[in-house]
Amino acid sequence: MIVKTRIFIFRNGNYRNLSELAQAMGISVSQIYRVREGKRQINQKFIVGAIKAFPNCKLDDLFYLVPDSPIVHNDHHHPSATYSTDKPAAREKIESTPPAPEGSPQLPRSKTSTSRATLVPS
C-alpha cells in the first residue's frame, strides 16, 4: 500500500503557497514539492508536519492508502514481463483523489470542476 495525501486540496483555503505550507509543517518546500509530484514517498516527518499544519483535521482526512501498482517490465526476454510498450502514456495511470471521510471539514469547490485527477507515474 502507498500513502497518499489530500493536504494539497486543504492547502487552498489555508495557505497561499507551498512556502507557507512548508513553514507550517516544519519541512522544506522541496520536500513538499517532491511529494506532490510523486517523486518522493510520504514519511513520518511529512505526516507529523501535516498534522501540525491542519490541527482541525483527522488523520483520515489528510491521508489515504492506495494499492501498489504492479511492476511492468519492458524487456521482451524478461520471464515476468506481462506486456511491452514504448509509449510513455502506457506506463502512467490516472488516479482520482478519493473523497475525505464523512464528517471531515468541507473543501472549497472549484467553479469549473467537481473532481480532481492526478497523473501518477507507475
Image (cartoon, rainbow, N blue to C red):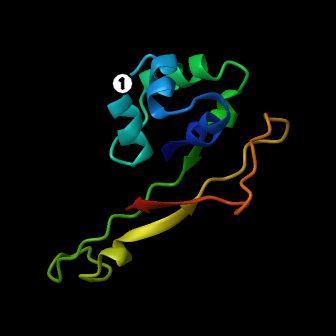
**115 over 65 or under it: above or below:** below
Look at label 1 and name its amino acid: Ser
Residue 23 x %, y %: 46, 18
Residue at 46% over, 68% down: 93
Residue at 33% over, 64% down: 71
Residue 42 x %, y %: 43, 35
Residue 28 x %, y %: 36, 24
Q: Quadrant of residue 103?
A: top right
Q: Quadrant of the C terminus?
A: bottom left
- As rendered, which of 89 and 65 lies closer to the eye? 89
Q: Is residue 95 visible?
A: yes
Task: Give the left or right position of residue 76, taking residue 89 as reference.
Answer: left
Residue at 37% over, 29% down: 29
Task: Give the left or right position of residue 19, taking residue 60 as reference.
Answer: left
Q: Quadrant of residue 40?
A: top left
> Circle 1 sits in a helix, a strand or a loop, which is it?
loop
Q: Quadrant of residue 81?
A: bottom left
**35 over 57 or under it: above or below:** below
Instruction: Mark 1: give few (<14), some (14-19) or many (20+) Cα within 10 Å.
Output: some
- As rendered, which of 74 and 106 lies closer to the eye? 106
Report how many numbered discs are placed on residues in the image: 1
Residue at 58% over, 29% down: 15
Residue 48 x %, y %: 52, 19
* Residue behind mark 1: 28
